[in-house]
Image: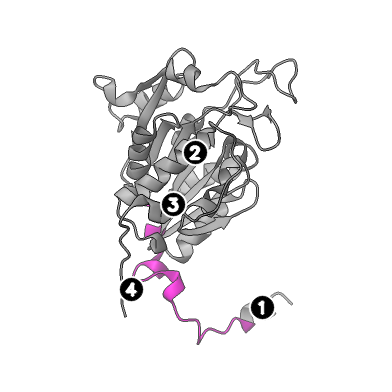
């Protein structure tokens, strides 16, 4: 018996009624609105969407959007999202977490998820600081940035998230800004529609602990790659050049897009139906267990 597709009448139907404790003006609000609007615009059945988060301020997202949700451990967003996709590859899987969660403790998972090109969308809420734990330096904090853990300033260079995901093997790499909700919505839609690992780095302020990278700071520097004459997101050379650009000018938009096979495409056991639909009634795991004794 086939399942009836649920069509949303308005984006408010995605509200859960739960409240969040984000600071007034937090960039997480813009990201949340953009994600909800993207799900609505794509006419996705909420029961066909899985949203997994890690630990951080913005990781409350699964509590705030009425889809299947999982609030995981710090840095373990992508392993859970990967398991979700492999268990039921017919679902739309979205992972979301902060820069500390994904680019710090979760960096190893980030690199290998991109390399394997799982068909999931990974949204990183990048405010260049650990906001939940009161303002420590994160992997994306700029050289010289002063925080509670670096009172004399950060001595190492910041990581380049787009360059990292590109060189690791992600087939869709983009960057948005929490202060431009409509444009961010379109980037998220494009990421969800892309078949493969879609990495979307979202620049946002931490209005409480990061007094440098504010809304105004970003607005004075951001420009859209779609406005650059001759820019080709299929060109790795162009994309990597733009991925290194930071400071006076910061590009947003789709840096790189490539159509190629996903990890799931190479798994014959899910070619006809999702793993979750396979019968296990006649499978005896006893011999496998006994082999360890």
Measured Cα–Cα span from mark 2 to mark 3? 27 Å
Residue at figure coordinates x 35%, y 46% from the top left: 38
Q: Are marks 4 and 1 in contact (CB under 8 Å)?
A: no
Q: Nearer the viewer, residue 181 or 271?
A: 181
- Image coordinates of residue 196 in percent, x first then y, are 38, 48
Would you name the residue on which mark 1 appears?
289
- Image coordinates of residue 9 in percent, x first then y, are 30, 57
Would you name the residue on which mark 3 appears?
118
Q: Is residue 274 magenta?
A: yes
**Mark 2 or 3, nearer chain start:** 2
**Which quadrant of the rendered structure holds the N terminus?**
bottom left
- Would residue 274 be found to the left or right of residue 137 on screen? left
**Mark 2 or 1, nearer chain start:** 2
**Mark 4 or 3, nearer chain start:** 4
**Which quadrant of the rendered structure holds the C terminus?**
bottom right
- Image coordinates of residue 227 in percent, x first then y, are 27, 22
- Would residue 91 be found to the left or right of residue 284 on screen? left
Q: Are marks 2 and 3 in contact (CB under 8 Å)?
A: no
Q: Are marks 4 and 2 in contact (CB under 8 Å)?
A: no
Q: Which residues are magenta?
A: 261-286
Would you name the residue on which mark 4 appears?
3
Dot 1 crowding, Cα within 10 Å, few <14, some 14–19, many 20+: few
Measured Cα–Cα span from mark 1 to mark 3? 29 Å
Where 47 sits versus 77, above or below?
below
Please name which of the two marks, 2 or 1, marks the residue nearer to the observer: 2
Please name which of the two marks, 4 or 3, marks the residue nearer to the observer: 4
């Amino acid at each position: 018996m086939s399942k009836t597709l649920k069509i949303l009448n308005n984006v408010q139907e995605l509200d859960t009624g739960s409240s969040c404790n984000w600071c007034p003006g937090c960039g997480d609000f813009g990201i949340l609105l953009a994600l909800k609007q993207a799900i609505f615009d794509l006419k996705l059945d909420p029961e066909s969407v899985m949203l997994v988060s890690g630990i951080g301020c913005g990781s409350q997202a699964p509590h705030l959007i009425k889809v299947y949700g999982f609030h995981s451990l710090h840095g373990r967003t992508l392993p859970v999202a990967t398991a979700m996709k492999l268990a039921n590859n017919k679902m739309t899987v979205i992972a979301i977490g902060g820069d500390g969660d994904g680019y710090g403790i979760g960096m190893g998972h980030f690199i290998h998820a991109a390399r394997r090109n799982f068909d999931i969308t990974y949204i990183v809420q990048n405010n260049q600081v650990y906001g939940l734990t009161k303002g420590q330096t994160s992997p994306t904090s700029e050289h010289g940035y002063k925080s509670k853990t670096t009172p004399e300033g950060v001595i190492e260079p910041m990581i380049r998230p787009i360059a990292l995901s590109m060189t690791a093997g992600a087939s869709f790499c983009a960057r948005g800004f929490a202060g431009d909700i409509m444009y961010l919505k379109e980037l998220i839609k494009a990421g969800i529609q892309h078949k493969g690992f879609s990495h979307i780095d979202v620049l946002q302020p931490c209005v409480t602990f990061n007094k440098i990278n504010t809304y105004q700071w970003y607005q004075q520097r951001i420009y859209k790659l779609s406005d650059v004459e001759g820019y080709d997101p299929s060109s790795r050379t162009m994309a990597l050049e733009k991925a290194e650009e930071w400071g006076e000018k910061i590009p947003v938009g789709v840096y790189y897009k490539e159509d190629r096979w996903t990890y799931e495409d190479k798994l014959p056991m899910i070619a006809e139906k999702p793993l979750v639909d396979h019968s296990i009634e006649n499978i005896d795991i006893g011999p496998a267990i006994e082999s360890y004794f």
